[in-house]
Image (cartoon, rainbow, N blue to C red):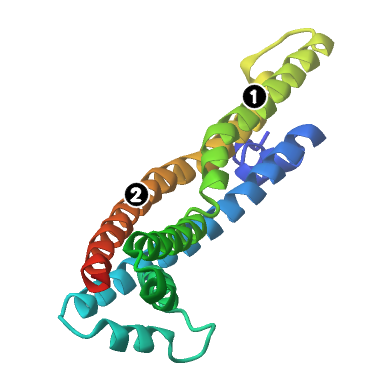
């Protein structure tokens, strides 16, 4: 017997039972999707941090808010400007719309509440976009080991059932079946570990961005309050 050939990785997968092969194929598909979302989320968060930094430097440079608003709204409507500029744009747009009504009623609180609600709505949209696919990574990290364990249990059960037809059971006779089954657990861990690490990292990064957005909304609301007087 050529143990190197019989116990090779590809040979063990090809000789596994149909159910174990389906489990392996499912885990590999999930792993590919997980890595796709990991890379996409990495670039999205990095771009969001860079755009936030650039806009904060521009905003706190002391320029005119109306000029900054015109700059934020100029260009192609589908141009990717960043999350924080869109939050600013939503608040400033609502503030400018409410100025006419404020002149008639003199109610500054309604003007500021409208701008704050517009920024909060934009904030929620941006957070939903940033948190997209995080739930998938969390599910992969928590479920994949159990899916792989299911394939392992099924493969080991078949390996021991095959011993019923063998007069003298040896380690050499049961080792290939157990090795085939354990590959399912290995693939499950291969899918789960990167997903868990990415989920924890990206959740932390998104929470930091959320704090920066929330802080900006409060500071910008104070500026609008002074302008409304």
Extreme residue in the left direction: 62
Q: Which mark is residue 207?
A: 2
Give the answer, above or below, for where 90 lies relative to 141. Answer: below
Front one among 138 and 214: 214
Tell me what residue is drawn at x 63 percent, y 48 percent.
Answer: 30
- Give the position of the C terminus as an image quadrant: bottom left
Badge 1 marks a residue whose secondary structure is helix
Numbered mark located on residue 32 in the image: none
Nearer the observer: mark 2 or 1; the answer is 2
Would you say 157 lies left or right of 171 here?
right
User: For residue 83, what is the image quadrant?
Assistant: bottom left
Alpha carbon separation for disc pair 2 and 1: 44 Å
Q: Which picture quadrant has residue 45?
A: bottom left
Considering only vertical position in the picture, is 191 above or below 72?
above
Whether residue 105 sits left or right of residue 216 in the image: it is right
Residue depicted at x 31% and y 85%: 66
Identify the image quadrant of residue 9: top right
Residue 13 pos. (x, y %):
69, 41
Residue pictured at 53% horizontal, 57% vertical:
37
Instruction: Tell me, yes or no, whether the two marked residues, 2 and 1, touch with CB atoms within 8 Å.
Output: no
Q: Which of 83 and 123 is in front in this view?
A: 123
Indicate the secondary structure of the residue bearing disc 2. Answer: helix
Characterize the local packing of mark 1: few (<14), some (14-19) or many (20 or more) Cα atoms within 10 angstroms.
many
> Which mark identifies residue 178?
1
Residue 117: tell me if it is visible.
Answer: yes
Residue 123 at x, y percent in the picture = 43, 59
């Amino acid at each position: 017997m050529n143990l190197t050939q019989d116990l090779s990785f590809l040979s063990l997968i090809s000789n596994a039972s149909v159910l174990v092969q389906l489990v392996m194929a499912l885990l590999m598909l999930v792993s590919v999707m997980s890595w796709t979302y990991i890379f996409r989320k990495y670039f999205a968060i990095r771009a969001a941090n860079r755009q936030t930094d650039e806009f904060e430097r521009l905003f706190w440079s002391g320029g005119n808010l109306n000029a900054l608003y015109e700059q934020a709204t100029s260009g192609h409507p589908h141009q990717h400007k960043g999350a924080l500029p869109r939050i600013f744009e939503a608040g400033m747009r609502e503030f400018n719309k409410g100025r006419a009504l404020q002149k008639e009623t003199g109610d500054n609180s309604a003007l500021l509440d409208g701008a704050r609600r517009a920024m909060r709505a934009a904030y929620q949209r941006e957070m939903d976009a940033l948190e997209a696919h995080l739930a998938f990574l969390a599910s992969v990290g928590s479920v994949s080991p159990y899916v792989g364990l299911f394939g392992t249990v099924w493969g080991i059960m078949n390996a021991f059932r095959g011993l019923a037809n063998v007069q003298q059971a040896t380690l050499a006779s049961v080792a290939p079946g157990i090795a085939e089954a354990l590959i399912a657990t290995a693939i499950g861990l291969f899918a789960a570990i990167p997903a868990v690490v990415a989920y924890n990292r990206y959740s932390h990064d998104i929470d930091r961005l959320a704090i920066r957005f929330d802080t900006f909304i409060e500071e910008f609301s104070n500026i609008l309050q002074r302008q409304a007087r």
